[in-house]
Amino acid sequence: MAPPPLADLGFPAWLRAAHWINVFFIGLLLRSGIQILSSYPRLYWGYDAVPGREWITFTRKKLPTDRHWITLDQETNAPPWLAQPGGKLLGLGRHWHFASVIFWVFNGVIYVFLLFATGQWQRLIPTSWSIFPEAWNAIVIYATLHIPPPRPPYPYDAIQQLVYAAVVFLLGPFLILTGAAQSPAIAGRFPWYERLFGGRQTARSLHFLGLLAVVIFTLAHTWMVIYTGFAQNISNITLGTGARNLGLAIVIGLAIIALCLLIYAVTTWASLRSPRRVYEALGALIHPPLGWLAHRVAPRQRYRRSEISPVFLVNGEPPTSERYELMKALGYADYHLEICGLVQHPLLLSYAQLRALPRHEQITLHHCIQGWSSIGAWAGVSFADILKLCEPKPTAQYVVFWSHSNDTSGRQFYEVIDLATLRHPQTLLAYQLNDVDLTVEHGAPLRLRAETLLGFKMVKWIERIEFVEEYASIREGQGGSREDNKEYEMEASV
Ligand SMILES: Nc1nc2c(c(=O)[nH]1)N[C@H]1C(S)=C(S)[C@@H](COP(=O)(O)O)O[C@H]1N2
Ligand SMILES: [Mo]
């Protein structure tokens, strides 16, 4: 069946609805995206974030000089008028970003489907090669600071048509693909996918440039809408092409924009006021798919020796207890790893016993939730070997890693990981980084590596490993120190 002619298509209700829904979620994505960027406001090319090699920095914040700085010192405060929700609420910013993505993609898929089902695609996709000479003519006219005339039946010039088509069919998918390339679970399981973009930091930089393209497009689009007949244009996209009452259309159009801004304001205010409740509400939506990804996808990372980062960044405050200081002074000779909880054989393994177990090595990319990444060669004990020794009981579902260090609330640092995720190959209790025994900064004497997860799950300075059935009864019940204190998500796979 031939599609109806372009002139008869008009702006059906679904197209108008999809347009405004898109505007609303793009706004949320931009706001929450800026929140995420503010946690590590510097961009790099390649795989890792090597200090000094950033191509752009958005902060003048100084690092502390009286102690070893950590990457949390590089986090900045985002202004709530610009970012969602503002401050240092990275965890909540991610929740807004991921929740918005779900609705935005859903809306986009329906829109594209209906474009093709109704013939509306003819608005965007050129049907003749003459579009290119016409586009060139349009550019020449723009260069003289004039607006080219529309080309009936199209309501706009050739360049506009090409730009609209590129935004829908190229920029949208580009943002989704570069977003996905930053996930530790996806990069861990499909290293070729990350290589396609030239590394995680390149994907992050491209994702940012995509954001910039969206902003520039939105400004240019808004300007054109105003310049080429604001009343008629806004009427078309709110009430449809048949509408007579242009005044009413303007009121409705502006009311929709005001409503979007109001919702951003209210949801930002709610996020700042009761972060935990917003975390739980949005979490109900995003945690199931993230958890599914983390434990379904087994990592297969293998970077080359030559790719090891010249500097492996450091995060997390080291232990300060006397006990740890003493252990360190003795070269960890009296260190013991305690394995307890729901296991057939509770264990107390000395440092020497741990190092006598088979040694495994892997060169992997570390993804910090803040946005930086580093490549390192880790060596240590395979978690599978520990499981063989202790034999978890059938009721054991989760493993709690307790650290010698304290979290930001001054209590013992801990993180919980589900047993299925830990059964993946490349789960390591590491004692070496780049062929030397771990330094204090990197978690001496023992730290976790779980290569489908974000860095904050990989507890350093491990004191004790406890097998449990559930974690709701541990501390605040969110699954770890960072979840309890900073609203990071337990299913740290993206
Ligand atoms: N005990 C403890 N472990 C921790 C942290 C911490 O604050 N305390 N920070 C985590 C975070 S956020 C990251 S990114 C990694 C950093 O590991 P690295 O310092 O070896 O790069 O450690 C993780 N393990
Ligand atoms: Mo991190």
Image (tube, rainbow, N blue to C red):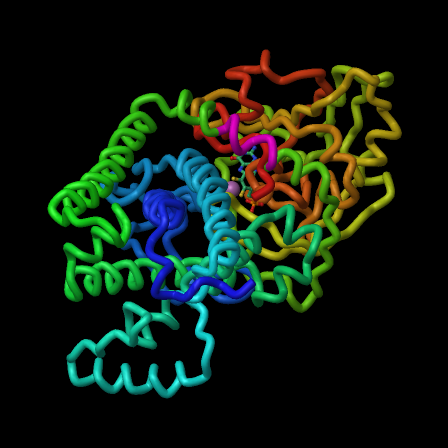
Q: Residue 181 appears in which quarter of the rendering?
A: bottom right
Q: Is residue 446 left or right of residue 28?
A: right
When the figure is inspected, residue 483 is found, relative to residue 220, above or below; the finding is above
Q: Is residue 430 left or right of residue 357?
A: left
Figure quadrant of the N terminus: bottom right
Kindly give the residue lying farthest to the top in the view shown.
473
Q: Which residues are the magenta region?
A: 283-289
x and y percentages locating residue 140 in the rendered image: 25, 87
**Magenta stretch: helix, strand or loop mostly:** helix
> Is residue 31 shown to the viewer in this render?
no
Quadrant hosting ligand 1: top right
Q: Is residue 286 magenta?
A: yes
x and y percentages locating residue 128 in the rendered image: 45, 80
Q: Is residue 425 magenta?
A: no
Identified at 21% across, 51% down, the residue is 235
> Is residue 307 shown to the viewer in this render?
yes
Figure quadrant of the C terminus: top right
Kindly give the residue lying farthest to the left in the view shown.
247
Identified at 37% across, 53% down, the residue is 41
Exactly how many numbered labels are in the figure?
0
x and y percentages locating residue 348 in the rendered image: 79, 22
The one of 166 and 115 positioned closer to us in this rendering: 115
The one of 398 and 108 positioned closer to us in this rendering: 108
The one of 427 and 346 positioned closer to us in this rendering: 427
Q: Residue 32 appears in which quarter of the rendering?
A: top left
x and y percentages locating residue 96 in the rendered image: 41, 37
When the figure is inspected, residue 164 is found, relative to residue 297, above or below; the finding is below
